[in-house]
Amino acid sequence: MTTRLDQPREIRRTIVPRPHYDPESFGRLSERFARFLGTARFLVYMTVFIVVWIGWNFLAPPALRWDPYPFIFLTLILSLQASYAAPLILLAQNRQDDRDRVQYEQDRSRNERSIADTEYISREIAGLRVALSEVVTRDFLRSELQQIIRELDAKDQHPTLS
């Protein structure tokens, strides 16, 4: 059977189905987890956990100790916790970077619109100033009318000169 490059492949059936997850809900979970890791509450819980662990393994009777002095099991648990925490924190940071990038683009386009609006208003104001310079002002009109009245009065006093 010849496969065509312009058509997608058929879905292969597997014995064990692939797990499907919602990336958005997983991202929200990682953000909540990363947010919790950055709180004082987490530090207090982790400190209490480690103090109880070490205290139990120092002070308990030897038969009840499960992790003697070098605390290798505790080290393994803390390493496991760190190995899961680091990628989740990075995922949360990437999501925050994406949100910041979108916010930056929206701010940038809003600023561009504001600049365009400001330039438009500046042009309109300049146009109004030019138009107002051509409009007759009240003082100019009054002075012209007074000049015409003086000329008419002068004609009335000297009717033969015209």
Image (cartoon, rainbow, N blue to C red):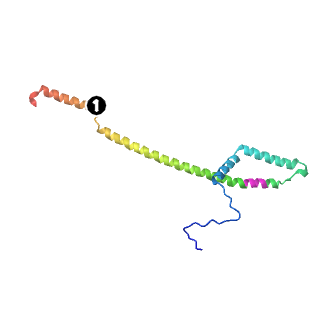
Residue under label 1: 139
The residue at the point 91 percent across, 52 percent down is: 63
**Residue 134 at x, y = what percent?**
29, 39
Q: Which span of residues is magenta-colored?
A: 76-82
Magenta region, mostly helix, strand or loop?
helix
Amino acid type shown at disc 1: Asp
Which residue appears farthest toward the top when viewing the image?
A: 157
Of residues 105 and 132, which is closer to you in this image?
A: 105
The residue at the point 73 percent across, 45 percent down is: 42
Quadrant where the C terminus sits is top left
**Residue 112 at x, y = what percent?**
47, 48
Q: Does the magenta stretch include residue 136?
A: no
In the image, taking residue 101 as reference, residue 127 lies left or right, namely left
The residue at the point 48 percent across, 46 percent down is: 111
In the image, taking residue 47 as reference, residue 141 lies left or right, namely left
Kindly indicate the quadrant of the structure image that contains residue 142: top left
Q: What element carries label 1?
A: helix
Which residue appears farthest toward the bottom when viewing the image?
A: 1
